[in-house]
Amino acid sequence: MCKRIVLFIVSLSFVFGAFAQESDTIPAAGEAPAEVPVISYSLSPKRYKIADIKVSGLKKDLYEDFTIIGLSGLSVGDEITVPEPDGEITATVKRFWRHGLFSDVKVLATKIEGDQIWLEIQLRQRPRISQVNYFGVKKGEREELDTRLGFRKGYQVTPNLMDRAKTLIQKYFDGKGFKNIDVNIVQKDDLAHEGEVIVDIHIDKNEKTKINEIIFSGNDAINASQLRKAMKKTNERFSLLRRFKTSVLELFSTKKFTTEEYENDKKNLIDKYNEYGYRDAVILSDSVVNINDKRVNIYLSIEEGRKYYLKDINFIGNTQYPTDYLANVLQMKPGDVYNQKKLNEHLSTDEESVANVYYNNGYLFFGVDPVEVEAENDSISLEIRIQEGPQATINRIIIEGNDRLYEDIVRRELRTKPGMLFSRDDLMRSVRELAQMGHFDPENMNPQPIPDPESGTVDIKYSLVSKANDQVEFSAGWGQVGVIGKLSLKFTNFSIKNFLNPKTYKGIIPQGDGQTLTLSGQTNGRYYQGYSISFMDPWFGGKRPNTLSVNAYYSKQSGVNSDFLSNSMSSYGYNPYGYSSYGYSGYNQYNYGYDPYNSYELAYDPNQSLELIAVSAGYGKRLNWPDDYFQFMATLSYQVYLLNNWEYYQYTMGFTTGSSHNINLELMLQRSSIDNPLYTRRGSQFSISLSATPPYSLFDGKDYASMSAASRHKLLEYHKWKIKAKVFTPLLPLTVKRTPVLMSRIEYGFLGHYNKNKISPFETFYMGGSGMTGYTGIMANETIALRGYDDGSIAGSGSSPYGYAYTRLGMELRYPFLLEPSSTIYGLAFVEAGNAWATLKDFNPFALKRSAGVGVRIFLPMIGLMGIDWAYGFDKPDYYSTRGGSQFHFIIGQEF
């Protein structure tokens, strides 16, 4: 019996609970002490019925008594055994400890009468967090750690919570290359709040751990350089003495060491061996050795095994497609190296894989399993076991996250419709079409097929993230005669059918139909005014993707007083009556020509003016041949130019006063297969267009050689041809979000005439600079960018006041810094070349002006795309000029 009592006491002490032999309550003065229950450990355990349970030690606003009693597992009326070291009371104490919410737990017997017992649960709660402070880390790291740790005010502090926090902090910084991090978490009482503590997290990152050298042994078939490239994230320090040949990506790749990336790269190493046919290759041993506090060496011992080849390949289970066809898709044959990477890609992951052949024809439940049925010497016999399953029909289309457009506007863009057979190509094309709308974040589109094998159907859920796409542009610049202001409003989700129904408005305008309305105004007060309005419906009529666009434009600008022009230009060494290296291009905001001693009031000349009135209407149709990325567009335009003493054309065409009418039809064939309009990773854009007026001179019988300039240009005539192409090539797999992209471009443009005596002074090419139309006196010209040179310095001023032919070639390397719904930011480096010629016979595609530079682009939802480029022009714009030199260019808007 004595042994039993000792065991009972030891057990209760271990779980920090005990039955009280006397009351812990101090009696009040003059009050007799309460009767204390006596538990005799010399007697056998006895069963008691719980008469009452009380809870003490906790704040009532945090825990109700019934909650604690419920957690205890005890209730009034239950029978318990006393004393009993492994009985109900012990289990209750252990249960409270497992919750981790309390620093002290006791269960006391306060009273015993007959077979009834009164219990009191005494608890002491752990402190709660009132404040968390980080020391030794940056603001961004603090915010990231806050998210990862999940520390919040009011959370209880437990040993597990502190240990978990320390582990997560070490893991987070290990991923950044800091392996020697020290973490010290200190708790101190918050004197202002009872029961709460301030948690101070002291972090010493020490030096980042970098890789000095990776040493391989046992690699005879594959050299160390190839193996290092296979380890994509685990890269050693570049040493010219150690390795002369290094790829560009390897030279600029990260050199930090992280445990997670190292483990992944060991798998990549074996995958590289499997790619060369070494299916048995293994890493026998590896070690990471510190050579100092900052650097480590990595030693890898490899057993390569033998190289294997394919003996034969057999397809089993294919009934829908013949074996010869699938073998052609697989592109592997007997005698080839047993390349497991290629096998997996051609079976499952490539766009032209065997799996996609089935997926694109409804076989969503398709499965394929390559099995090695024989391995003899260095030869492998493969069986490609196919489970075709039934074809899956689309049941429902579920759209989540759309709060901008009417749902039918979104659904009409989808290539997946209920009742159709499932197709992976249709699914990915639908994602592309949704991205092109511009109303959803293309980086967070997540289409999810939800198959139902029992019914043979599939639901498709499109999870979208809406983003603001309307744009407001408010800009101001300095022109030759003062400040120029511009205000532009672009509503990309307009609804013209609800224009007269204010109840449907979202905000101040009707929205929801995905139509585009643009209003723009630009002015310099008396010197210049320009206004435009345009409307575009991408689904005119609502049934087919046929585009309707309508535009109207008006501008008027005055001339500049010749005395003001002479003084302002001569102050910079310009010749006001000839063309300098920069030339005079009207009110060009980049060619300032500003003289602070020459009043702007003297510049205004109301007797000189140029007015332009233009309207146009276009209709486009999506084509199905050669494929449905093609679109054909026809646009009918009318412009009238009203000139009054406009002396800036007298040096070329002699046309200064009068009106000129331009009636033209533009036909354009274009193809666009880009995946993302903001940061494009793959695809291409191509367009070929012809814009032409009627050939009046061919049938009116007039002698234009003897006419005045005003009469000759009363009706403009020309034919204008343009070819543009862009190709986007990803430099890393598309599974990498921040994929660098190489963009290549080529452009040609030609402006021809029907009659050599009736050459158009308008619609020519204005080349050089940023390509922004801006505030210029050459609104009748088409602006072509060539960075590294002044605006219009290639054509539009200088020795070539008009460009009747141009070419432009270029390449851009782009890298994204931020791809979020709120903003997109990417940097670029470019080389480009181009030129323009005053006559078609002078056209020479090999005589080009070259430049190179760097820049950045920022897309903000309410502002649109903008950026800044620095470029250096290597050649002279014309015979009389110096080379282009260093130039900064500001960019607003997307260029084709």
Image (cartoon, rainbow, N blue to C red):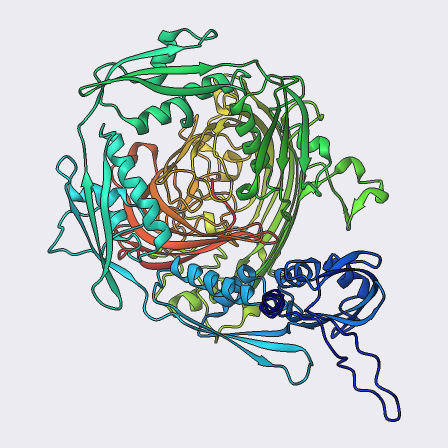
Is 228 rendered above or below residue 340? below
Which quarter of the figure has residue 572? bottom left
In this view of the protein, can residue 583 be seen by the observer?
yes
Is 741 on the left-hand or right-hand side of 246?
Answer: right
User: What is the quadrant of the N terminus in the image?
Assistant: bottom right
Residue furthest toward the left? 241
Is 489 rendered above or below residue 363? below
Q: Report the front residue among 416 and 10.
A: 10
Q: Report the front residue among 765 and 290.
A: 290
Q: Position of residue 162 (x, y in %)?
A: 53, 67
Task: Please give the name of the residue rendered at 30% of the width and 32% of the height, measured from the top-left corner.
Answer: 841
Residue furthest toward the right? 30
Task: Please give the name of the residue rendered at 27% of the width and 55% of the height, measured from the top-left corner.
Answer: 883
Is 891 rendered above or below residue 333? below
Q: Position of residue 148 (x, y in %)?
A: 53, 59
In this view of the protein, can residue 690 be seen by the observer?
no
Task: Please give the name of the residue rendered at 41% of the width and 15% of the height, measured from the top-left corner.
Answer: 385
Q: Position of residue 607 (x, y in %)?
A: 59, 56
Q: Position of residue 101 (x, y in %)?
A: 65, 66
Q: Report the front residue among 96 and 558.
A: 96
Total marks placed:
0
Task: Please give the name of the residue rendered at 76% of the width and 69% of the height, measured from the top-left corner.
Answer: 62
Q: Report the front residue among 2 and 608.
A: 2
Residue furthest toward the bottom? 29
